[in-house]
Image: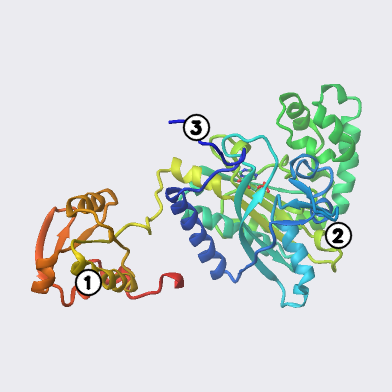
Amino acid sequence: MAAPLYQCPKGTHDILPDEHLYFSFIKKVVRYHCRRAGYRRISTPMFEDINVFVRSIGDTSDIVEKEMFVFESKSGKKYALKPEGTAGVVRAYLQNGMQQLPKPVELYYIEPHFRYNRPQKGRYRQFHQFGAEILGESDPAIDAQVIYLAHKINTDLGIADRLTLQLNTLGSLEDRKKYKEDLVNYYTGKERSLCEDCKRRLHNNPLRLLDCKEEDCQILASMAPKLSSVLSEESKEHFRLLQEYLKELKVPFILNEQLVRGLDYYTHTVFEFWSKKDGAQNAIGGGGRYDGLVELMGGPATPAIGFAAGMERVIEYMKEAGIRPPNKDAVDVFVAQLGLIAKKKALPLLNELREKGINTVGAVGQASIKSQMGLADRIQAKYSLIMGQIEVQEGTIILRDMKKGSQETIPFEGIVDKMVRLLGENKLKNKKLWEE
Ligand code: AMP
């Protein structure tokens, strides 16, 4: 077959129907747990004024330096496709006066994000994240609850036992300032052993030297002074309480003093869910506290914490674990018909079955019964209902159990109710599908 004329852009991918089963399932689990815990859903635009990201994520972070899709409007205004969720949520929080709402304000999102990075397995230019943010409360019990929410979602998706929760504290903004000085002192004179990126980072974002993946940089990082040595008593207490709460909630974690996260805005708690197999390489998500961000974006001082996870990576883990999401698209009934009068009866029958919540497909073209039944087989319909001229005249219909291969002729009257009973009252219960 000749190569198609057009391909989707590099680093993007089509989500085909089989893949959507995973996305739908993940969304359902996320929505379920977020709602139960009082979070409400928010969506922000796919693009924002570029300064929303530069200001919040920090102009020395990898995302802002290298990974944003930036474009200009005709009037010359600069925008960027959103590379992460928190900056837009904070912008929306302030713009919509949400600081007036009772605290804490709990929000969640499920959205596509965009990063201009080198595409590889598990790394795309358009990817999907779900995430949650709690604004307006600084107690470490909130940190524990946010982490619990992420852990619970991982558990229900069946992937928690493939992950480790890495936990660290970055202390307050003052602690970090002091620590940065210590780091610069430690690295000064050792620049020659650093990679090019780290040489640059030493001057504009020394904390990032700690999570560089280059071997030589990692050796130096392992001997660098620890942030724990400069933490204030208050920061230590926050972190100590968080660990106690996590133990109460039975969320296992590993303390990792080198975990810093890529973004500038974090303070105190930071965490990531790493692969037990590949460590940080294939992290599925992470987050942390960002007590200074709302103020930095022009709002009142507002403590906050959040997390985000990548859905494509979650799906990879689910597949590795052999987890198959329920197939809500599975066809329950196939309606086959032959001849004009049968077709006239089949059309309303299709609709009546669908209105009862039964997934129903009908071949209403001109095909022979044989080819219609071939189609019913291919789409793996559970039952077929078959009608020709004779059945219509006799007021009957043929019901075929596709798995068993058996069939019987039964009265047409009451066929919808019979199918409802056959397919299990439980599944159907006349529930509107959009209400789930
Ligand atoms: P981050 O805030 O950068 O740690 O991103 C949170 C999660 O989003 C990561 O752990 C990944 O699961 C996912 N993610 C981030 N960037 C990408 C990408 N380029 N492609 C696919 N998933 C990504």
Q: Residues within 10 Å of mark 2 (few under 14, many from 20)?
A: few
Q: Of 168 and 150, which appears nearest the observer?
A: 150
Amino acid type shown at disc 1: Lys
List the residue tagged with mark 3: 3
Q: Secondary structure beneath disc 2? A: helix
* Quadrant containing the N terminus in the rendered view: top left
At 87% from the left edge and 25% from the top edge, which residue is drawn? 191
Q: Is residue 172 visible?
A: no
Is 308 left, or right, of 388 in this rendering?
A: right
Give coordinates of residue 226: x percent, y percent. Answer: 79, 39
Amino acid type shown at disc 2: Leu
Q: Earlier in the sequence, mark 1 or mark 3?
A: 3
At 68% from the left edge and 56% from the top edge, which residue is drawn? 46
List the residue tagged with mark 2: 296
Q: On screen, 292 above or below 178?
A: below
Q: On screen, 130 above or below 426?
A: above
Give coordinates of residue 134: x percent, y percent. Answer: 69, 65
Q: Is residue 354 visible?
A: yes
Q: Residues within 10 Å of mark 3 (few under 14, many from 20)?
A: few
At 52% from the left edge and 46% from the top edge, which residue is drawn? 14
Q: On screen, 397 above or below 232?
A: below
* Quadrant containing the C terminus in the rendered view: bottom left
Q: Secondary structure beneath disc 1? A: helix
The picture quadrant where one finds residue 48 is: bottom right
Q: Of 365 and 391, which appears nearest the observer?
A: 365
